[in-house]
Image (tube, rainbow, N blue to C red):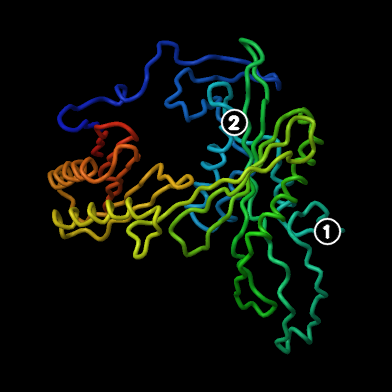
Amino acid sequence: MKRFWWIPASILLLTACVPTQTNETEVVGTEEVETAIIPSMQLDDQFYRTLLPYKQSATRGKIVNRLNSRYDIEEAEKGLLRLSQNQFSPDDYYFQEGQKITDEEVSAWLRRYHPEDNPTGLNAEDKRPPLSEEELASGETRDNPSPEILAHIIEQNYLVKTNEDTIRLGGVSVGLALNSIYYSENDQGVSYEETISQEQLESEGKRMADEIVNRLRQKEGMADIPITVGLFKQKSRSTITAGTYFTYGVAPGGENSVAKWNPINEEFVIFPSSNPEEKYREVDTAFKNFKQDVEEYFSNFTSVIGTGFYQGDSIRKLQIEIPIQFYGSSEVIGFTQYLTGLVMKHFPENIQVEIDLNSVNGAEALILRKANETEPIVHIYE
C-alpha cells in the first residue's frame, strides 16, 4: 500500500489529496458522431480535462527520434500546454492530442524542400550538385548544406461544448521544435555540428508557422478555428536542462498567418552554480546551504542537483533530484523526514519545491511543497 505522509504527523490516503465529486463522468457526442466521456474531476485549475477514450496524435512517436533529449521531449509538450492556456482556458476547453496533421504530412513537412520530390518540405532545400563516384572515391567533399532548422511539429487540440450533449473543436495549438545546433555528416560520413543563430531561428520559425497555419486552413472545419503557434528552441545534446518556448502567436479564425508574436521569457537553470547571475544568486545560496546540510546527514549518496524553472526574473519551481545508495526502509524514512525539514528551513514559501529521492530500485520518496503552502506532502513508495 502507498502511504502519503503529511509533515509532521498524519498519514492520508490519496483521495484526501484531490477534490471529490459524486458524478464521475459526463457522456457527450462529438461533431464526428462519436461518443466521448468528459471526466468530472479537474485535479488542478492548470490542468485540462481530457476526453476519453484517449485518442493519440498520428505524429506521437516521431518526437522521440527528432528531439535531442528527454528534457526537450517533455518540455516541448508541457510548454505548449502552458502557453495554450493564454488562449484556451482550462475552465472552458477540453484537451485532445492533435488529430488534424497526419503522419504522412508531418513526415513530408519535416524533410527538406525539393520542387519535385518533396514540394511541401519546410526545411531548406539542398541545392548542391551531387558528387560523382570518382569524387567520392577520392575523398572530396562539398560545402555543408544549409542546416535543417525544424526538428518536430507538435499539435494539440482544444474542444468546447456547443450544448449540454455535444462538443466541437474550438482551437488548435502547434509547437515547432527548432534546432539551435544542427548535427549531421558530410559526404565522407564525418560528423559535424553547426550553431544556428537566434535571429535565423526566429525568422525561419515564423515563416514556417505561417505556412503551417495556411495549410491547416485548407482542412475541413479549420477555416474559422483560432490557431496558437509556439516556437521552441532545443538545447544541445549534451545539456541536462530542457529548452523553452521563446515566442508564440495566434492566428485568429479566418486568418492565414499569425497576427502578432509575443516574446516568452522562460528558462531552466541548474543549481548549484559556480558563478550565478544576480537574479539566481538568492536561490543558489539557499540551495548550497540545503546541499551542505544533506551532506552532513548521510555520506553514502552521489549528488544533489536542482533545476529551477524561471519565468522572467522570478523562479516558479525548483526540482531537486537526489540519488541514494542505501536501501533500508528505516533509512529512507529517516532521510526523507530530514529532507522535509530542510525544505521548510531553506526555501521561501513562494517557491514550489519538489524533491525526488531515487535508488537503483527506482523511486523511493517524493516531497512536494507547493508555493505559498506551509506544509509539504510526503509520499514514501513501498
- Which of the 4 image quarters holds residue 249? top right
Residue at image coords 69%, 52%: 205
Q: Which of marks 1 and 2 precedes in the sequence?
A: 2
Residue at image coords 80%, 38%: 256
Question: Circle 1 — which element?
Answer: loop
Q: Nearer the viewer, mark 2 or mark 1?
A: 2
- Seen in the picture, residue 112 relative to 87 is either above or below; the reply is below
Question: Circle 2 — which element?
Answer: strand
- Seen in the picture, residue 39 relative to 318 is either above or below; the reply is above
Q: CA distance from mark 2 to mark 1?
A: 33 Å
- Seen in the picture, residue 91 relative to 182 is either above or below; the reply is above
For the C terminus, the image quarter is top left
| Left or right: 185 as drawn, with respect to 310 | right
Q: Position of residue 14 (x, y in %)?
A: 30, 26
The kind of residue tagged 2 is: Gln
The kind of residue tagged 1 is: Asp
* Mark 2 Cα-neighbour bin, 10 Å: few <14, some 14–19, many ≥20: many
Q: Which residue is mark 2?
A: 96
| Left or right: 219 as drawn, with respect to 276 | right
Q: Which mark is residue 117?
A: 1
- Seen in the picture, residue 97 relative to 209 is either above or below; the reply is above
For the N terminus, the image quarter is top left
Residue at image coords 76%, 61%: 124
